[in-house]
């Protein structure tokens, strides 16, 4: 199946009693639910959902025929606002060496199609428990916020491209902590990549599309190409 195919190549199934299939429905962020075959994939999706440049996230988007004769199905395909695409492979660190040759072949084939490749493990995905904070923030996405409150926060951040701390936003805009988190969950404003949520944590205005490379998944997970 070609990399442009929108449908998963196989139905996600649970392969063992300890592996629970999850379907994350984030309609205010992605246009369709995202399936996950493991808790690590779920934790990746939770963090990726808050990366402001990711416009679409597809699970098992296509199948590649590798030069070795084997077939490879990527875990995820991210599409950025600019249209650029990135395949993400989510693996436990202890298993990456076993699949190194497959990943190298896939990376080469994808590069020829203009698609980048990123391997992520629990080391990046669960760094400083950022996935837990991402889940906490996303709970606020359905919360209603007064339009005037929203405008005050956005206007104040527009004056501070370097960002403001959570406490400063609350005090300067006369808003509640939950108001700020509601906008972060809707990706109307940007958090730090580690999803820090203490009073000194900075929140930022969203950046224009021409600078979207600054907040792509490689930097969001603080991961060099592997």
Image (tube, grey):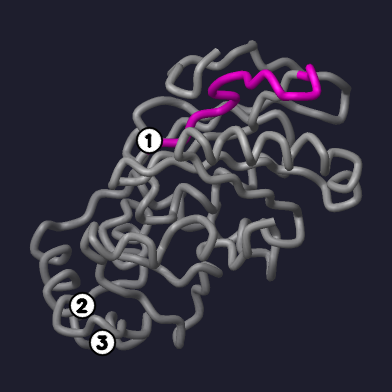
Structural distance between the alpha carbons of marks 2 and 3 = 13 Å
Would you place residue 80 above or below residue 170 in this image? above
Viewer-nearest of discs 1 and 3: 1
Q: Which residue is mark 2?
A: 157
Q: Who comes first in sequence, dot 2 or dot 3?
A: 2
Residue 60 counted in the magenta span: yes
Residue 30: image tag: 1
Q: Which residue is mark 3?
A: 171
Asked if residue 188 lies left or right of residue 226, the reply is left
- Provide the residue span drawn in magenta: 56-70
Question: At numbered mark 2, what does the secondary structure look like: helix, strand or loop?
Answer: helix
Asked if residue 78 lies left or right of residue 71, the reply is left
Magenta span: helix, strand or loop, mainly? loop
Structural distance between the alpha carbons of marks 1 and 3 = 32 Å
Residue 94: image tag: none
Would you place residue 148 above or below residue 102 in this image? below
Asked if residue 211 lies left or right of residue 26, the reply is left
For the C terminus, the image quarter is bottom right
Q: Residue at x 21, y 55 (%)?
A: 145
Q: Position of residue 172 (x, y in %)?
A: 20, 87
Question: At numbered mark 1, what does the secondary structure look like: helix, strand or loop?
Answer: loop
């Amino acid at each position: 199946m070609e990399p442009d195919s929108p449908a998963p190549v196989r139905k996600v199934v649970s392969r063992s009693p300890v592996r629970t299939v999850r379907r994350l429905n984030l309609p205010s962020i992605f246009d369709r639910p995202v399936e996950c075959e493991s808790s690590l994939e779920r934790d990746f999706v939770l963090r990726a959902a808050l990366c402001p440049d990711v416009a679409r996230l597809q699970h098992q988007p296509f199948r590649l025929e590798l030069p070795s004769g084997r077939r490879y199905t990527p875990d995820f395909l991210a599409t950025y606002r600019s249209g650029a695409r990135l395949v993400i492979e989510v693996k436990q660190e202890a298993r990456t060496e076993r699949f190194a040759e497959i990943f190298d072949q896939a990376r080469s084939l994808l590069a020829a199609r203009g698609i980048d490749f990123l391997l992520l493990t629990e080391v990046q995905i669960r760094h400083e428990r950022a996935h837990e904070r991402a889940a906490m923030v996303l709970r606020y996405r359905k919360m209603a916020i007064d339009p005037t409150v929203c405008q005050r926060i956005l206007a104040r951040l527009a004056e501070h491209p370097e960002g403001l701390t959570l406490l400063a936003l609350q005090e300067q805009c006369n808003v509640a902590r939950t108001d700020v988190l509601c906008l972060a969950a809707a990706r109307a404003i940007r958090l730090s990549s580690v999803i820090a949520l203490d009073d000194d944590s900075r929140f930022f205005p969203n950046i224009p599309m021409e600078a979207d490379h600054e907040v792509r998944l490689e930097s969001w997970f603080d991961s060099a190409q592997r």
